Amino acid sequence: MNLNFVLREMTHLRYYAPLILEANTRGISSLFYVTPSNKYNCPFLEKNRNELEDFAKKNQVKILTIDELKLATDVIITNEKSCLEQIKQVSGPKKVTMTYQTDFVLNYKKFNYYDVYDHILMPSKNIAKFYDLHTDKNLYLGITKYDIVLDKQEIIKKHNLESDKKKALFIWPKSRDTHRMPIGIISNFNKLGWQVLVKARGKDPVSSETLKSLTSAGNRVFSDDSWYPHTTQELLEVSNLVVNPGSTTIEECVMHDVPLINFDIKPEIRHGIRMPYRVTHSYLYDYDFCINLESLDTTFSTSKLSDMVDNLQDGDIRSSFERCRESWLYNHRNACKNLLDMLESAC
């Protein structure tokens, strides 16, 4: 059997890589069909291309162009709507789409996933029902990107982090929302003796002035330094707490057992349209591993932050993560095995 992965964005490698590793243990061949995205995560940018080629070489994956997809056999795997028109033109192979964070909320019906794909890998049945997207083509097998084992000490060494300090992972907001995010809370963490790890994206960078201020205080600023293991997952593995701007990083927090302080700053109107769900994954915030705030009032202090941190570290937080996963995600790490078992029986 061949697994033919459509790769337009390096972002999707974190979903593909664990599946490829599992496929290799079964003697299943994998191929990448690469096409440019012309964005910060484009596989043709030199840094990204080098990482992709290195991964492919180590794991016996052949790299082809998207034009060669028409020759694919057995199984085509894509992520959301990537290269949808090219995929429609191929007949024969099973067509599987993975879903990325909560992009499926708009994409599923807009791009008619049900008629295009044979299988749609959804996060869970409850999530599909919540968004009224529960169909007989959905697969509820888990999320492949979490089939990964990370070593905390190796990550600390790799990124030259301060091993003796607690760490807060600060998810940098979209440029649109920066003015609403209380960035000053970083200095409060520093006063508590914490090191803050700021994670930004290529399309929402930290300004040079802010970067200088953050690093001079001993904090670190990261972008997407590696796609597999992905930088965010690496930083989560070494962090004691996350500060989140309402992003879908909440899913990763739940899967990595990291409590969070969340600032609910997302506007209802985005990209010029009123969103049907202002905050996707809203159900993941309703547990005691999360403190939800809209802003910090004038009485906020380092002492109050200390109390928040204590509240998130007291009690039976681990069981809350387990309950959340059982209700909304999944509580195992066999997504790749489950998916390949299904595909092998179907091909």
Image (cartoon, grey):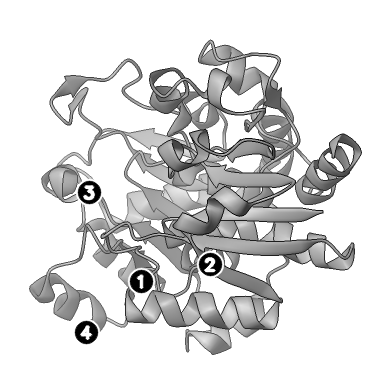
Element under label 3? Answer: loop
The residue singled out by tag 3 in the image is: 174
Element under label 4? Answer: helix
Mark number, residue 64:
2
**Of marks 2 and 4, the one in the foreground:** 2
Q: Are marks 1 and 4 in contact (CB under 8 Å)?
A: no
Mark before the other along the chain sequence, 3 or 1: 1
Q: CA distance from mark 2 to mark 1?
A: 13 Å
Mark before the other along the chain sequence, 2 or 1: 1
Q: Nearer the viewer, residue 264 or 29?
A: 29
Q: Are marks 2 and 3 in contact (CB under 8 Å)?
A: no
Q: Are marks 4 and 3 in contact (CB under 8 Å)?
A: no
Q: CA distance from mark 3 to mark 1?
A: 24 Å
Amino acid found under the numbered disc labelled 4: Ser
Task: Give me the residue at 64% from left, 63% from top.
Answer: 31
Element under label 1? Answer: loop
Q: Is residue 344 visible?
A: yes
In the displayed structure image, the side of residue 213 where residue 80 appears, left or right: right
Tell me residue 233's x, y (percent). Answer: 55, 62
Mark before the other along the chain sequence, 2 or 4: 2
Task: Give me the residue at 81% from left, 41% from top.
Answer: 343
**Of marks 2 and 1, the one in the foreground:** 2
The residue singled out by tag 4 in the image is: 216
